[in-house]
């Protein structure tokens, strides 16, 4: 092993300062042994350049594997959430169409029933009452029918508004879940990268 000082020069220096040749050689020999032991301890804690490159490749390979797994997991989870959102949107559109069809049907039925009732009342009144009484009764019945129809339409509109509000709330909840999941994925990636960075440093 290569020494970092001249042992012969040190022996001569010790002899010049009053030590015998034997004492000087013993002192120098002890110093050499101490240095060898210290170097052995240092070399045990050190790695060679080849070992360092191998360790770096292993760490980078592990990071790449983790990153790939996280990307696959993120894509699969995001695809599942997107499919769920599309399903909810489709259900919302179907419910909206059903409600609108029901409203159209109710309005048509009400209009038909109202027209039939008007015709029937007209015939009855014309058969039994004078024209003035007929006009009064017809106006009263017409106002009553309009009021009932307005109440029915108002209740239907309120029901539609409630259903749409509930569906919007559900959709917003799913959007919030998506945002939380994406934020959690980014935070996890950063945590893993920071952990490997600290391990390497």
Image (cartoon, rainbow, N blue to C red):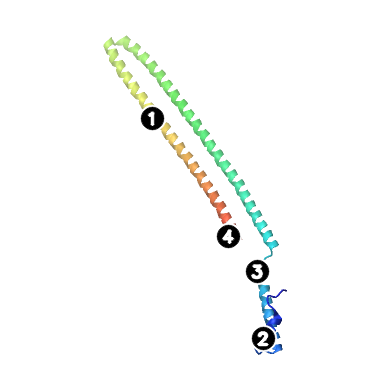
Indicate the position of residue 121 as horizontal and vertical percent values: 34, 14
Give the position of the N terminus as an image quadrant. Answer: bottom right
Give the position of the C terminus as an image quadrant. Answer: bottom right
Badge 4 is on which residue? 198
Discs 2, 4 touching: Cβ within 8 Å: no
**Residue drawn at (66%, 86%) of the image:** 14
Closer to the eye: label 3 or 1 = 3
Mark 2 to mark 3 CA distance (whole Å):
34 Å
Categorize mark 2 by other alpha carbons within 10 Å: few (<14), some (14-19), many (20+): some
Indicate the position of residue 136 as horizontal and vertical percent values: 28, 15
Among numbered discs 4 and 1, the one appearing first in the sequence = 1
Among numbered discs 2 and 1, the one appearing first in the sequence = 2
Name the mark on residue 45: 3
Badge 2 is on which residue? 14
Among numbered discs 2 and 3, the one appearing first in the sequence = 2
Residue 130 in view (yes/no)? no
**Residue drawn at (67%, 61%) of the image:** 52
Among numbered discs 3 and 4, the one appearing first in the sequence = 3
- Given residues 78 and 23, the one toward you in this image is 23
Categorize mark 3 by other alpha carbons within 10 Å: few (<14), some (14-19), many (20+): few
Look at the numbered disc 3 and give the secondary structure of its residue: helix
Discs 3, 1 touching: Cβ within 8 Å: no
User: Is 43 rendered above or below residue 198?
Assistant: below
- Given residues 135 and 30, the one toward you in this image is 30
Among numbered discs 2 and 4, the one appearing first in the sequence = 2
């Amino acid at each position: 092993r290569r020494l970092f000082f001249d042992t012969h020069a040190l022996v001569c220096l010790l002899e010049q300062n009053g030590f015998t040749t034997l004492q000087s050689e013993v002192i120098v020999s002890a110093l050499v042994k101490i240095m060898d032991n210290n170097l052995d301890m240092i070399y045990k804690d050190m790695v060679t350049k080849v070992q360092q490159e191998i360790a770096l490749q292993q760490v980078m390979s592990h990071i790449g594997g983790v990153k790939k797994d996280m990307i696959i997991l993120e894509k699969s989870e995001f695809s599942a959430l997107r499919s769920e959102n599309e399903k909810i949107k489709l259900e919302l559109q179907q419910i909206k169409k059903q409600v609108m069809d029901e409203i159209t049907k109710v309005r048509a039925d009400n209009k038909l029933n109202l027209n039939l009732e008007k015709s029937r009342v007209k015939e009855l009144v014309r058969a039994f009452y004078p024209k003035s009484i007929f006009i009064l009764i017809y106006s009263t019945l017409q106002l009553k029918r309009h009021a009932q129809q307005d109440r029915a339409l108002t209740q239907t509109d309120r029901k539609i508004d409630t259903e749409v509000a509930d569906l919007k709330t559900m959709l917003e909840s799913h959007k919030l879940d998506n945002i939380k999941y994406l934020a959690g994925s980014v935070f996890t990636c950063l945590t893993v990268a920071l952990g490997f960075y600290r391990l390497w440093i």
